[in-house]
Image (spheres, rainbow, N blue to C red):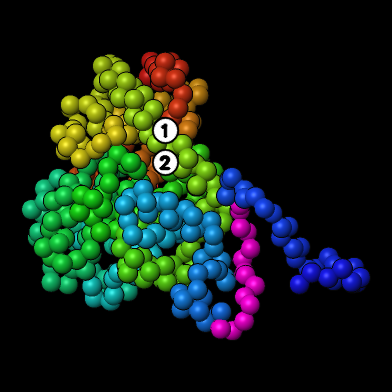
């Protein structure tokens, strides 16, 4: 391709530069931004499309950074294969679109992330997909939610905001008995346990949260058996839900410190949860490392790396929650989680906004709840800020 022949300025400017020859390799992954690849001939494009040659031709269908990230996540979750999607919701949506047909039925856990509930109950119902909800803390309700048309069970390892834990082993058993895949959203608990080893079929993550870890990327992934992931990949490409190179690269970079962050934030969160539990202005604390949490025993049984970065507590009502948010000097009210810095959210105004108030009340998701996503700051600095804001209530 290279030519030292003089060419017109316009030609020189327009042509892609050559990749400089190098006897060495970069230590950090390159960012492969190219949206399209030069293919040598028609035999190769056929072979690339049919999977007989490995490589890339169009970034929506695959690019090196997504492959690097998908492979690493798959290894982390002990999965055969992985696909990177444009957001956590893209991973959930691509999975549901791939696994459900018209007139199929999906059994969904109570208290899923609001948009996952909306997807299953309001959007997929437009295409004739039926649903029923089950209470993950009363597994007999799952047996009655499974019908002859059920083709998928969906749950979250740790729910938001009350941090209810799914008994992955028992739901996995029920799914196996019914002969249907079990998809689990593991966004709140990466590394705390491995759902595929406990009986789930597919794990999805919002990488936007703890795995990305720096609030600078929006991305998601689905991990599981190759046959199902290939199908999800194809749907994700067709529906335009795959993720880009830079976000994949950022997620890989965030992942480098995931293990350390999980351990440190679990330690800090446990200490803060104890302090919150004995504070006069706090009505109730939900943290999986506290004996008072209804799922403390289950968490102790299936978690292997601490109890996570999330603490939810009740300050009485919306007004008190608003006053707390206004009084915090350092901890930002930010409707997400998993950042290296501690953030605080108000579920009724954010993640669960727009959900049926009667359902929220039944689930115990009340306007006085605030959810802390604990970061890497010193525990005493965090307590100073929380303490002075609670004092202002
Ligand atoms: C449990 C859970 N799943 C999925 C999502 C969606 O992720 P994303 O915002 O990356 O689409 C979220 C977002 O908060 C979440 O909390």
Q: Is mark 2 within 8 Å of ligand 1?
A: no
Circles 2 and 1: CB atoms closer than 8 Å: yes
Where is residue 114? Give x, y as percent: 34, 51
Which numbered mark, 2 or 1, is in the foreground of this view?
Answer: 1
**Occupied quadrant, residue 162:** top left
Q: Quadrant of the C terminus?
A: top left
Main secondary structure type of the part rendered in magenta: loop
Where is residue 190? Give x, y as percent: 34, 43
C-alpha gap between disc 2 and disc 1: 9 Å
Q: Nearer the viewer, residue 164 or 348?
A: 164
Where is residue 221? Give x, y as percent: 41, 56
Query: Would you say 100 lies left or right of 9 here?
Result: left
Q: Of marks 2 and 1, which one's residue comes earlier in the chain?
A: 2
Indicate whether residue 288 is drawn in magenta: no
The image shows residue 130, relative to residue 279, as above or below, that is: below
Callout 2 secondary element: loop
The structure residue drawn at horizontal position 32% and vertical position 34%, both measured from the top left corner, is 308
Q: Which residues are magenta?
A: 30-43
Query: Would you say 155 lies left or right of 174 here?
Result: right
The structure residue drawn at horizontal position 19% and vertical position 57%, both measured from the top left corner, is 133
Instruction: Using the rendered image of the protein, determine whether residue 171 is visible from the camera's viewpoint.
Output: yes
Callout 1 secondary element: helix
Residue corresponding to mark 2: 210
**Occupied quadrant, residue 199:** bottom left
Residue corresponding to mark 1: 261
The structure residue drawn at horizontal position 36% and vertical position 71%, both measured from the top left corner, is 231
Label of residue 385 in the image: none
Instruction: Using the rendered image of the protein, determine whether residue 373 is visible from the camera's viewpoint.
Output: no
């Amino acid at each position: 391709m290279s030519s030292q022949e003089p060419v017109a300025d316009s030609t020189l400017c327009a042509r892609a530069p050559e990749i400089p020859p190098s006897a060495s390799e970069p230590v950090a992954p390159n960012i492969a931004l190219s949206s399209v690849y030069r293919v040598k001939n028609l035999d190769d494009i056929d072979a690339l499309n049919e999977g007989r040659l490995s490589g890339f031709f169009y970034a929506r269908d695959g690019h090196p950074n997504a492959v690097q990230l998908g492979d690493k996540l798959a290894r982390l979750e002990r999965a055969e294969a992985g696909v990177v999607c444009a957001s956590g919701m893209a991973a959930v949506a691509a999975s549901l679109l791939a696994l459900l047909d018209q007139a199929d039925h999906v059994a969904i856990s109570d208290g899923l992330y609001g948009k996952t509930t909306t997807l299953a109950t309001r959007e997929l119902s437009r295409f004739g997909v039926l649903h029923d909800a089950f209470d993950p803390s009363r597994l007999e309700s799952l047996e009655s939610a499974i019908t002859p048309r059920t083709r998928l069970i969906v749950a979250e390892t740790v729910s938001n905001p009350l941090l209810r834990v799914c008994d992955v082993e028992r739901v996995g058993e029920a799914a196996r008995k019914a002969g249907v895949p079990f998809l689990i959203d593991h966004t709140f608990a990466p590394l705390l346990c491995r759902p595929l080893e406990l009986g789930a079929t597919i794990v999805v993550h919002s990488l936007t949260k703890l795995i990305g870890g720096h609030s600078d990327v929006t991305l998601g992934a689905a991990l599981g058996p190759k046959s199902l992931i290939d199908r999800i990949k194809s749907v994700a490409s067709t529906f335009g839900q795959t993720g880009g190179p830079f976000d994949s690269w950022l997620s890989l970079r965030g992942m480098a410190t995931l293990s350390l962050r999980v351990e440190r934030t679990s330690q800090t969160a446990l200490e803060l949860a104890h302090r919150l539990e004995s504070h006069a202005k706090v009505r109730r604390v939900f943290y999986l490392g506290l004996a008072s949490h209804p799922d403390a025993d289950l968490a102790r049984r299936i978690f292997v790396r601490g109890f996570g970065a999330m603490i939810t507590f009740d300050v009485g009502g919306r007004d008190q929650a608003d006053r707390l948010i206004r009084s915090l000097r350092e901890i930002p009210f930010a409707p997400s989680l998993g950042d290296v810095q501690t953030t605080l959210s108000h579920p009724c105004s954010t993640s669960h906004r727009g959900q049926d108030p009667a359902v929220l009340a039944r689930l115990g998701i009340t306007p006085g709840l605030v959810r802390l996503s604990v970061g890497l700051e010193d525990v005493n600095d965090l307590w100073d800020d929380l303490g002075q804001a609670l004092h202002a209530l």
